[in-house]
Amino acid sequence: MDDRPDNAPIRALRCADCERTDSLVTNLRPTSRIAIPAEALVGFPDGVPRVPRGLSRRSLLASSAIGFAAIYSAAHLGWESIWNAAVASADAGPQNCLVCIYLQGGNDGLNTIVPVGEYSAYQSARANIARVLGPSGGGQVGTTTMLGTGGGLAFANPCVSGPGNNGDVKGFDTLYGDGSGGAGSDLAVFPAADYQPPDLSHFDSRDYWFAGALEQLETGWLGRWLDSFGSSSNPLQAITLGSTLSKQIRTSSAPVCAISSLSSTAFQIQGTSVDANLQVANLASVPFDAANVALGRSRSIYGETVEVSNRLSGLNPGPPGTGYPTDPSGLVANLQLAATLLGAGLGTRVITIDWGSFDTHGDQITTQDPQLAVLSSALAAFKNDLIGRGIEQNVVTLVFSEFGRRIASNDSAGTDHGAGGLVLVSGSSVNGGQAGEYPGVAPNEQDPNGDLVPITDFRTVYQALISEWLGGDPTAILPDGPFPGIQRYDGGTNLMK
């Protein structure tokens, strides 16, 4: 839907297609659902157990499910074959992985990465929501200049570390560093990536981004990469964290899956610090009358469950990483789960996450800024979590939205659908800094509808991720390629170090 008309009645209706802005596939059902045994997270130290039928109670408990995976595959895959394939993939050695965070609704890049080099034009276009230069104060949100941009760009302060900003010790600023792409400069920023001409419908635009093509395709761009270069037997190679598959990893033949969550193998009592495992073990050890067969069986089962839980805790791949912000929205929980899965050695190459509510037609400051604070802090904590697991060097994170917002704000202190979305790529292997050209917000730089004129095609980013990180020929994956290469502010042409 094109929402360019700017009057109140139309604004009230403009987001009939904003009701649902996630990347989930709605016309595809999983071919099967499999239990995820606790021992999968520690690489099956005793080997992959056989199909549950015929197992002893102790073996069954040892393989107790801590979650379930919805499998999407062209061919039927058995439980045992899936886990054998996952173990075999892991045995091949570390491989480069990609985590995709999709910001639902169309994030306003201009209030995330602020064009301070054209501040007068920026401030004039959106006076009711504009950031101010320098520190925040007096009820106004400030900016922190980004090095390596010639003074042209700045982070909005909710994205940067420190009290009064995101409230954390890390943020986009600590990931970005000096913007040189050297050591410690690990966040690449594309201020405005999109396609031409822009389509400002959530449905159409997000489908183009997920497909990596300006046409309706059944498969996602990462799904096609998996069909060409992935495993034919390991659905854990690509995981959507959620109940339904993301279009990004929809394939023609390669197996993929969706996982909502994983639970603990231990007994727990919510809201207390009591060691529930110890209490259950004590109860299980209380003598009982030999004539009471049912009580004996019950205590035996509880005792064996505690025994298995205690044994697995010694093999734990690590507790959820610390240092994450408080976050009831689900991003932190999903990043912690992503770190656990990536560290488990299951042959996972791709993880997708949908998050947020960035369709800020009104009251944008109070809606967008808390999310930017969580995102910046959580992304930095995710990096530290991966470092603690010894795998950070093999993981790159892509953050994107389906489009940006209009240059001018509206009368509701918000912004409407526009062209040129912000894209971030993070990781110690990433050539940090300003990785894409900034198109400008001055009236003579806008398109006839008051939008940015994006210079970076979003498929340029995908092309670089395939050729420089995941591996393979991008022209075999992305229709209409090849696309123009990376054009960094400093003249460089590489996305990766």
Image (cartoon, grey):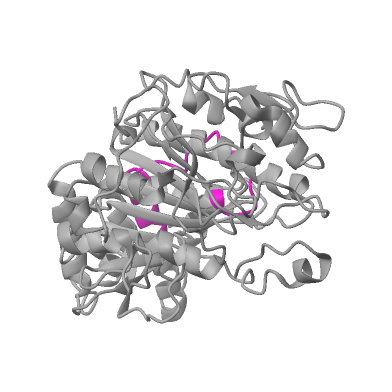
Magenta segment range?
305-331
Question: As rendered, which of 47 and 27 lies closer to the eye?
Answer: 27
Is residue 48 among what the camera can see? no
* Left or right relative to 405: residue 304: left
* x 16%, y 61%: residue: 228
* Left or right relative to 25: residue 372: right
Q: Does the magenta stretch include residue 318?
A: yes
The percent position of residue 428, horizontal first and vertical second, equals: 36, 29
The percent position of residue 10, horizontal first and vertical second, equals: 76, 70
Question: As rendered, which of 355 and 387 lies closer to the eye?
Answer: 355
471 over 200 or under it: above or below: above
The percent position of residue 476, horizontal first and vertical second, equals: 18, 58
39 over 58 or under it: above or below: above
Image quadrant assignment for residue 480: bottom left
* Left or right relative to 111: residue 310: left
* x 71%, y 24%: residue: 163
Query: Furthest residue to the right?
Result: 138
Q: In which quarter of the image is the N terminus?
A: bottom right
68 over 309 or under it: above or below: below
The percent position of residue 414, horizontal first and vertical second, equals: 75, 52
252 over 117 or under it: above or below: below
Is residue 445 among what the camera can see? yes
* x 22%, y 60%: residue: 226
Question: As rendered, which of 277 and 384 lies closer to the eye?
Answer: 384
What is the total number of numbered labels drawn onto the structure image?
Answer: 0
Q: In which quarter of the image is the C terminus?
A: top left
Q: Main SS type for the magenta part?
A: loop
Q: Is residue 375 magenta?
A: no
* x 16%, y 56%: residue: 229
